[in-house]
Amino acid sequence: MIKIKYPDVLLDSLENGHMIIDDAFNVSYWNRWLCINTQVPKEEIIGKSLEEFFPEINYTVLQRKIKTALTIGTPTFYDANSSRRFIPIERNKVTTSSLKLMQQQVTISPYIVHENKVMISIYDISELFEAKLLIKKEMEKAHKLNEKLEADKEIIDKNIMVMKTSAHGVIKDISSFFCDFFEVTKRELLGKNVSIFKLSDMSDIIYRDLWETIKNKKLWNGELQYRTSKGQEKWFQARVVPILNIHGEIVEFSAVFHDITKEKLLAELYITDPLTKLYNRAHFDETINFIAKHQRKAEVDFILAIVDIDFFKRINDTYGHQVGDDALVCVSKNIKKSLRENDLVARWGGEEFVIMLKNVTLDEAQKIMEKVRSNIEQNIVCHNIKVTASFGLTKYRENEEPKETFKRVDDALYEAKEGGRNRIVVK
Amino acid sequence: MNLEFNEDQIDALREFMNVSIGAATASLASLLGAFGTMHIPKIEICNSHELAGKIESTIDLNSMYYVTKQLFTGKFGGECIFLVSEASATNLGRHLYITQNPSADEINDAVIELTNILTSTIVSRLTQELGTQVQFFVPYLHFTDAHSIVYEGDISEYSKIIIISTILDFQDQQINGNIYILTKDEAIESLQVLIDEKLEEIYG
């Protein structure tokens, strides 16, 4: 090992403060770093007590630490995170202001033990400390954000129906609100396939459309119907979103449901005749005007029929309005049960009903209406009272205004009435 | 790598630790004016993921703790952890700073000072007995709950850890704390070699 010829030069070149003091705090060495940073020249301090220059130091603690270092023979330390600096030194850094005074790490090492001398080394750890403060600040921010997210998550959990599934439809998470609504527990649903929610009467077309859309990585928006275990019919607005990973592969699906049962009931009420439960005139008008306006091939092929109960005024006058209402309900049921699912029937007003028979010829329509007429004639309304009805039929012609179709069908009905009632006339 | 200690090695290590702890108790009495006792050290070798559980099993899980960690390096290197409860740390601050209401800085510094004396004395004396030397690093202190003393993720890269633990008790000042000397993998092997060399030296 070489002998260091100029230890002063070496210690002066260090970017740390080094002083040598004894247990009475007399300074015997003071390096260049300390001269510059404390503005106390070595010529002034050497041979004097540190207390004269830095009275703010807690000398009881310093003396104990010096004694410890000298007794144990290993360094002792001050707390590097302390807000109390060993020697307060102003920082000149202007770009940040979090630390006005230099943060110091102070180590007291035994130097010449039999002379009770120690070396006090001061390291500037301000940059490190600032970084630590910054991390702490960011951690606090992240913590607050996390708390807010947790609170938001709780709000969502308690108030919104949310479901998460794997790419294969296995339920991974579900909100409490969803469970409460369906009266199930999370445990019952987690790990099960979402197909358990496939509604028995839900249209296969809707189900297929949903899966095809989301499997093609697109969002699906639509209405779903569900029948509860208690037999209640519920409607949901659903929004199903595929979640993709960075490779664009589906990793899970998230779905948000909104109960629209009340809205659905209101909408139904708006278009339904309260007595017969058939559609009302407004809905039929809206439908036929829509078809006439758009002229879609699949929709314009229909037969229009009008049904009018014969001598209805006489029934009302003879048996009273209750029997009249019973007759209306009886006829509407007969019409409804004789038609297909996609045919449209509405109460047109008074004792008149209007029917849209889709994708049939006039002959076929006439046969269907004949069946309806016969059923009405044979059915007893109440107390052995029977009614009959007259029918007018016409085919909608492409591009014609609905009022023209209605004119023809009205004429046909008029002829049926004139011809003796309880019959069908085609125009 | 065989990290299991044989009976002779364990006996020797326990004996060296008894001497070291005796020295630490004497240092504390002379330097801090506090006369305390330290329990007979417990020596355990465990897998790294068991460390948190081992520490938690020896402390009150409902307290907050001042945790000081100090590294030492050399042929036998490792980490010393000193745990002191909030109440004990406040009593220590009162004792060392001679004040009824020590500030947070004073409590922190007092805990660091006590740790430094304990660690330096115990480890220096132990390594002296083993005929080697160590270098100490600045102790790092944090205040935390009982479950955050050890982050299991941070130590998962180690396979084995040796825990030498003892309890420090100053009845007059109502200060007590737990000390753990931890060392891992290669350092355990070095410790075995050092103990064997010492046993060879003593018994020939």
Image: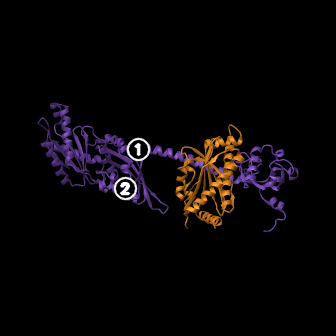
Chain colours: A purple, B orange
Along the line of sight, the residue nearer the viewer: A330 or B7: B7
Query: Which residue sits furthest right?
Result: A43
Kind of residue at disc 1: Phe
> What is the x, y in percent for residue A421?
14, 42
Same chain for marks 1 and 2? yes
Instruction: Describe the element under mark 2 as helix, strand or loop.
Output: helix
Numbered circle sitting on residue A210: 2
Kind of residue at disc 2: Leu
Nearer the observer: mark 1 or 2; the answer is: 1
Q: Which chain carries label 1?
A: A
Instruction: Describe the element under mark 1 as helix, strand or loop.
Output: helix
Along the line of sight, the residue nearer the viewer: B145 or B187: B187
> What is the x, y in percent for residue A170?
38, 56
Q: What residue appears at the point 16 percent right and 44 percent down from the top-left corner?
A: A416
Q: Disc 1 marks which residue?
A: A177
Mark 1 → mark 2, Cα distance in angstroms = 23 Å
Question: Is residue A175 found left or right of B101 in the rendered image?
Answer: left
Q: What residue appears at the point 83 percent right and 61 percent down from the top-left corner?
A: A9
Residue A15 location, quadrant: bottom right
Q: What residue appears at the point 37 percent right and 55 percent down from the top-left corner?
A: A210
Along the line of sight, the residue nearer the viewer: A130 or A232: A130
> What is the x, y in percent for residue B56?
54, 50
Query: Which residue sits furthest left?
Result: A384
